[in-house]
Image (cartoon, rainbow, N blue to C red):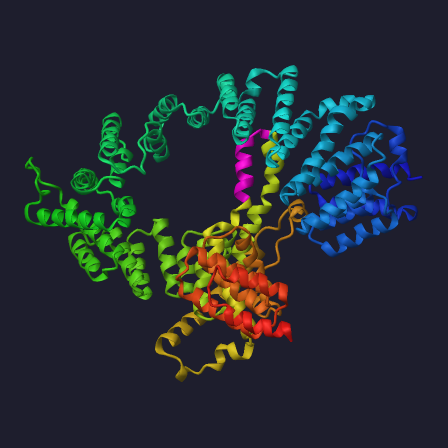
Amino acid sequence: MFPFFKAAHVFHYKKCYERKEYKSGLKFAKQILSNPKCVEHGGKMFEVIYCFRTYISNVIEETLAMKGLILNCMGKKDEAYDYVKRGLKNDVRSHVCWHVYGLLQRSDKKYDEAIKAYRNALKIDKHCLIKTRVLQENLQILRDLSLLQLQMRDLDGYKVCYTFLQFLNSEFYRLLKQTRYLLFSLRPVQRASWITFAMANHLLRNYDTALKLVDEYRLQQQVRSKPAKALDYEHSELLLYHVMIYREAKRYQEAYDKLVDYEKHIVDKVSLLETKAELLISLDRKTEAASMYGTLLDRNSENLYYYEKLEECLDHSPSVDNDKILSKRLKFYEEMCRKYPRSLAPKRLPLSFTHGASFVSILNQYAKSMLRKGVPPLFVSLRSLYKDAGKISLIEKLFLSYGESLEKTSRFPDEKVSQIETPTTLLWVYYFLALHYDYLKNYEKALQYLDKASQHTPTLIEISTAKAKVYKHSGDFKEAARLMDEAQSLDTADRYVNSKCAKYMLKAGLVSEAEQMCGKFTREGSSPTDNLNEMQCMWFETECALAYFSQNKLGDALKKCHEVERHFVDIIEDQFDFHTYCVRRMTLCAYIRMLRLEDTLRKHRWYFKAARVAIKIYLRLHEKPFDENENADDSITNEQMSSEARKQRRKDKKQQVRNEHNKNLKETTIQHKPPAKKEDQENEEPRKEPLDAKILVKTLTPLDDALKFLKPLLQLNSREIDTYLLGFEVFYRRNKLLMMLHCLKKAAEIDANNRALADCKEKFKSYMNTNRLNASMLELVVEETNSVFLDVENCRKFNNSDVRR
């Protein structure tokens, strides 16, 4: 029997683990294991405690497994796994050992293995539920399992898991009279069981079950009513979630009726009005919906979505382009302008559907007010109109007339009032025309107007940034970076211009200069690159990857791509923090939206940019593996290098020396710092392994590594044609015929006339002509190939001859 005086140590090391006092926890574990009788203790050591106090709610885990868990938290993973496996070896029927083993697998992101371990723990423990201590551990295992299933989107398993939790919390607990007090003390857990089970059914589109669960929970909540103040916000969110389920089930009338009943209890009035308006539109009660959107516009008159929906309610269909509808829409926006005189949206929106003289008239009023105020984003607000060639010519004609009139008379043309405009009005006309011609790729004229603007006001930052933009669009990245550096020197406290300058430097291949530029706004005493990586500054890392790739520094480029990929992994991992928090705080509608956003997270442009560079590099490494001697800088003599390359090489060497000096300086400052407290040292969590460019570029499986970046884009049905063109190249090298064909079909749907797609088609044809296929595969491929291109008869003949043979 386990010595009773050791039981206190068990309580102590458990508390140490919960408080993250890992070294103290190890000491207590050592004291327990120092007893010869307890060295290989597995799970039978707590009978004395259990007999002494049968109502203990939190069972103490096996010492070996817990020691492994503490070591894992300290970053000693090999030792941790060794101790946990020793615990399992000694007592393979210990549910706690399996639970801890699952926690270790979860910390290593091996979620499938962690789920298996949790299920093993539940299988072992399912016959022991009558014991209070085991019951509580069983619940904890179920909760941990449900979080992993939700993270992996195993919604069926998640529902089953919470079905069991629901059963335990409602029916089975009634049979356990000795745990009744414990159950009522665990009210937040009880609520989570009902809500998460309802959410599981909601996500699986079992709307009827979800609605019944929410209704049942609301009835229970009314019986155990709290003070009104405590229920305000949480109760309001629950009611909105209830209506959300009705809406997604397309039971609009019931949803509207519920919303009317709940109106007094809902705190978020904006969500209430928006939901009510959308439901009224779904019920074809547009007059009532229009009044709702009118109320919303009173709150926010710049919301473009409200104007769009209000027009829909008033039957101002944008698809119908006749005079009656246009006059109705113009009158509507004139009324909105009178009602909201300070709002820009009703003044700008008519420009999207008017033409000819009415378009010029409205644009004239809108542009004059913006030019007089000196609003730099005027061009940005009108850029969406440039899809219409007729409107482009009207805009150009109008602004050219502004420039001529202001140069001669300092007035706008056809002004009845003899008002002399301020000199800055002409400046902003020059600025607009420069951006206008830059958009039309007439870079010479754009620079002419920018020169006029700089003569007018030489110190205006917007002029320098616009010049840099023109040079960038024309392909002169070096000059663009120089001009942006000048703009940044005019206002060193402007972080936006600083970031733009760094981006332009990266476009020009000046990586070290860009790092120094970003260092002006990063934390002192640390490397700018490390600080930007810590802040998940993905635009910087993707631009760095492109810069290194253009310089043939494949290892450094891969490192940046993997850093971006790690950021997306971290964002997905951060869901764990919200699975319990959102249920506890009842922010259910936002939580459902977050889960759906996370499912499509890798559609983001930063992931696509990084993945595209990484896949290109891995394809190159597959064709020509990295050779350190061949890629060494010392193998290139100064005579073989251009003058610019020699300058860049000298700059890189200077920057390398500077970085080493900063590193040494940082180490010395760390040495001179006062030693950290023991508690801080022992509580410090293990850091991620740093990425090594040299190791990444020496990969032996480049196609497998490329596939890791490619798979998420294919699964999310990316609308970027490069996804499928690069996918074709990867599968072409892996001899995956059907996947090659899939990529060709998807690329043809996006842009059938793409030149790179034509090259891929030729590769596919040659592959079909040189590789033998069996009869069933041939028929399938030929049938599908006809939808991509028609010239497959030669492939059919070639393969048929082989089949006959």
Residue at x-position 69% and y-position 53%: 75
Q: Left or right: 550 with respect to 472?
A: right
- As for residue 595 lying within the magenta part, the answer is yes
* 529 to 336, vertically: above or below: below
Instruction: Looking at the picture, tell me which residue is in the foreground, 79 or 351.
Output: 351
Residue at x-position 52% and y-position 46%: 600
- Residue 375: give x, y in percent of width and height: 24, 42
Instruction: Looking at the picture, tell me which residue is in the foreground, 678 or 756.
Output: 756
Q: Left or right: 195 with respect to 35?
A: left
Instruction: Looking at the picture, tell me which residue is in the foreground, 278 or 500.
Output: 278
* Displayed quadrant of residue 651: bottom left
Q: Residue furthest right?
A: 1
* Displayed quadrant of residue 94: top right
Secondary structure mostly seen in the magenta stretch: helix
What is the span of residues highlighted in magenta in the rendered image? 585-598
- Residue 57: give x, y in percent of width and height: 79, 30
Q: Left or right: 383 with respect to 756?
A: left
Instruction: Looking at the picture, tell me which residue is in the foreground, 665 or 718.
Output: 718
Asked whether residue 528 appears in the rendered view, the answer is: no
Count of numbered labels shown in the rendering: 0
Image quarter where the C terminus lies is: bottom right
Q: Residue furthest front?
A: 804
Residue at x-position 34% and y-position 49%: 494
- Residue 676: give x, y in percent of width and height: 62, 49
